[in-house]
């Protein structure tokens, strides 16, 4: 009998598996930061979120990313985070953009991390509502679902991602972008919360 060739895992499956440890590290950092302890700490989280979203939305001008993800205009939360900071009477501060030299396909990895955080933000939004009395209209726009719903927009993104990641070279580049994005958000949390 000839051995049956097993299909290579999709890019989305590889990203999920290969960044699982980084995802857990992010959870540990969030526990350290305690961003929902009070509004002042939450404002520090929103500032980190703003700078990360700025990094991500900087990539939206890349024509290759526009071709790979045709609905970029519905994604990104930079403006929402900035509006939330204004609601909270806070300013983001000045930090250089981390993605100045990032291009496709690495850009897809950055977008993967951003979109994953949007999907997971439903839990964070509940925390903010219950503990801090904020919502999608005031202070917590950056955690709100997309108009079409979190799951719908996420599934569409995964479809674009898997379509684009059809070669080992592309997959490795996207993975590198995702790792860099996780590292960046971790660095932003450490900076804003003065964590070790």
Image: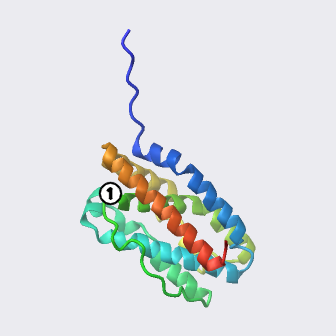
**Vertically, is 123 above or below 162?**
below
* Picture coordinates of residue 38, whole percent (x, y): 73, 79
- Does the rendering let one see residue 141? no
**Vertically, is 92 above or below 60?**
below
Specify few, some or many for label 1: CA neighbours under 10 Å numbering under 14, 14-19, or 20 or more: many
Q: Nearer the viewer, residue 46 or 176?
A: 176
Q: Residue furthest top?
A: 1
* Picture coordinates of residue 188, whole percent (x, y): 56, 74
Quadrant of the image for the C terminus?
bottom right
Residue 46 figure quarter:
bottom right
**Residue at the spot 31% in from the left edge and 49% down from the top edge:** 164
**Vertically, is 108 above or below 101?**
above
Query: How many numbered marks have been drawn onto this rendered protein structure?
Result: 1
Viewed as shown, does residue 64 lie left or right of 159? left
Viewed as shown, does residue 81 lie left or right of 167? right
Residue annotated with mark 1: 105
* Picture coordinates of residue 54, whole percent (x, y): 44, 76
Q: Residue furthest bottom?
A: 89
Secondary structure under badge 1?
loop
Residue 98 figure quarter:
bottom left
Viewed as shown, does residue 77 lie left or right of 106? right
* Picture coordinates of residue 110, whole percent (x, y): 43, 62
**Residue at the spot 39% in from the left edge and 19% down from the top edge:** 4
**Residue at the spot 42% in from the left edge and 77% down from the top edge:** 97
**Residue at the spot 37% in from the left edge and 48% down from the top edge:** 171
Quadrant of the image for the N terminus?
top left
């Amino acid at each position: 009998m000839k051995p049956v060739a097993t299909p290579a895992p999709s890019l989305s499956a590889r990203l999920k598996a290969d960044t699982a440890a980084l995802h857990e590290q992010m959870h540990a950092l969030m526990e350290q930061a305690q961003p929902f302890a009070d509004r002042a700490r939450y404002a520090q989280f929103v500032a980190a979120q703003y700078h990360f979203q700025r990094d991500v939305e900087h990539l939206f001008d890349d024509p290759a990313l526009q071709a790979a993800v045709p609905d970029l205009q519905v994604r990104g939360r930079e403006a929402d985070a900035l509006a939330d900071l204004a609601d909270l009477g806070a300013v983001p501060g000045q930090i250089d953009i981390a993605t100045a030299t990032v291009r496709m396909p690495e850009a897809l990895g950055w977008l993967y991390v951003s979109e994953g955080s949007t999907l997971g933000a439903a839990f964070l939004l509940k925390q903010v509502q219950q503990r801090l009395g904020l919502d999608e209209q005031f202070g917590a726009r950056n955690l709100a679902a997309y108009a079409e719903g979190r799951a719908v927009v996420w599934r569409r993104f995964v479809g674009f991602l898997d379509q684009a990641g059809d070669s080992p070279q592309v997959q490795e580049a996207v993975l590198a972008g995702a790792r860099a994005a996780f590292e960046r958000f971790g660095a932003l949390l450490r900076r804003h919360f003065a964590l070790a």
